[in-house]
Image: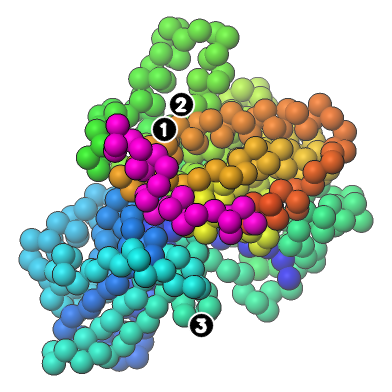
Amino acid sequence: MTVAGVHELFTVGLGPSSSHTVGPMVAARAFAARLAESGDLTRISRVQVDLLGSLGATGRGHGTDHAVILGLAGEDPAVLEPADGRRIIARVGATGALDLLGEHPVAFDPDTDIALHPRLRPERHPNALRLRALDPDGGAVAERTYYSVGGGFVVDEQDHPVRGRRAPATTVPYPFTTGAELLRRTASTGLPISTVMRRNELAAHTDDELTDHLRRVWQVMRECVARGLSTRGTLPGGLGVRRRAADLHARLTDGRADWAVAAVDRVSAWAIAVNEENAAGGRVVTAPTNGAAGVVPAVLHHFVHHVAADTPPVRRADAVERFLLTAGAIGGIIKAGASISGAEVGCQGEVGSACAMAAAGLCEVLGGTPEQVENAAEIALEHHLGLTCDPVAGLVQIPCIERNAVAAVTAIQAAQLSLNGDGTHRVCLDTAIRTMRETGADMSTKYKETAEGGLALNVVAC
């Protein structure tokens, strides 16, 4: 057994949330596809959707209702253009009709056919959606429940993966599910973490497939940053949050920024750019979630533009792949030992995980040993323990956007602290992960992506 791979942890999708937007879209598309496979598609006259638990609590703010519509229409979050998605949503709202898989029309009223049930919290996972397909007489033709378990990962009611798990039959050369196991693999082979991860990935994918995926991930990250740095205006949702990345970038490029803090401001600008794009429903890479999507690309931009700027392109491209593979190994260990879902463990599982992944990736490409890489991940995660997920108005904006910028800077500091040591430390990564899992279990539900406590209440009260 081994951890989730980079194909699962780094996926291309649409904002604002991997668990509340990407996952439900994947689930709804899978439901419609099952209807087609069973020959029942043309019998359907209506589809009804129940959003349960956390999906019901913040579904509107996170775009879950729109995601379900797009999934039923057969759209894939990895390739759907945001503008095309908006046109589909507008057409359904105007006509009261939806084309299942883009081919079979059914009546659909988003206000009545999508029901929110925030108080119904399933034991399996707090992010659940139930879909029912009805015939012209109102009889149920099919019904299925799906769980969006974080990062776009989706399983059905039998725990069968819909998206995001390595095939069970895949045997990898260096299996690991914990930090300790990973370090034993590197010690016995003399390989760095990135190579261990790469060889495991090659058990399920060809070398070309793996390279293409990693290059695609980096390309989408760069495009997302570029869009965020060039777009001004106000984010959707009603809070009136002004986009800041473009103005911050302008100050950095025209010399107005204080040189002493310019490096920090650049990292912040890159992270904010990504998360403003995410909040606006743009295309991002889940890393490992949409809410934490800005941390890894910001730190990777820091490495490429400040550390490896004079490195030959081929070597720089290789370093980017090693960064992502190392980050993926750490993300997989965290997911296996705890969670990357804000609805399960709070934001420590999202931004905390992303910070650990980024710190580990940076540490390796800066020449860190496996022990130093593990230490960097532990430092980053340790200092996010207990972090709550309490988005104001249920939107992935406050405090989410700034939180990514702070975590990106923390990741760089964690890598540097580790590199200044020899990898020896008292608290190991596995202990931090176990602590995160236990803290998440103890954490009140109102602090886990429900917008029922913390800033979500106090900002409104001010």
Residue 439 falls left or right of residue 52: right
**SS assignment at label 3:** loop
Which tag, 3 or 2, sits closer to the chain's start? 3
**Residue 110 seen from this side:** yes
Relative to 139, say whether 109 is above or below.
Answer: above
Relative to 393, say whether 254 is above or below.
Answer: above
Residue 380, quarter of the rendered image:
top right
Q: Are marks 1 and 3 in contact (CB under 8 Å)?
A: no
Inspect the image, locate mark 3, and give the three-letter code of the amino acid beneath it: Gln
Residue linked to disc 2: 269
Query: Distance of mark 1 from mark 3, alpha carbons?
Result: 39 Å
* Mark 1 Cα-neighbour bin, 10 Å: few <14, some 14–19, many ≥20: many
Inspect the image, locate mark 2, and give the three-letter code of the amino acid beneath it: Ala
Name the residue rendered at 90%, 52% in the picture: 187
Relative to 257, say whether 22 is above or below.
Answer: below
Which quadrant of the figure contains the N terminus?
bottom right
**SS assignment at label 2:** helix
Which tag, 1 or 3, sits closer to the chain's start? 3
110 in magenta: no
Residue 403 placement (x, y as % from top left): 49, 35
Residue 208 placement (x, y as % from top left): 62, 58
**SS assignment at label 1:** helix
Residue linked to disc 3: 158
- In depth, the one of 452 and 126 nearer the eye is 452
Q: Are marks 1 and 2 in contact (CB under 8 Å)?
A: yes
Magenta part of the chain: 438-462
Name the residue rendered at 52%, 79% in the picture: 160
- In depth, the one of 50 and 423 nearer the eye is 50
Residue linked to disc 1: 273
Q: Main secondary structure of the magenta part?
A: helix
Name the residue rendered at 49%, 26% in the picture: 268
Which quadrant of the figure contains the C terminus?
top left
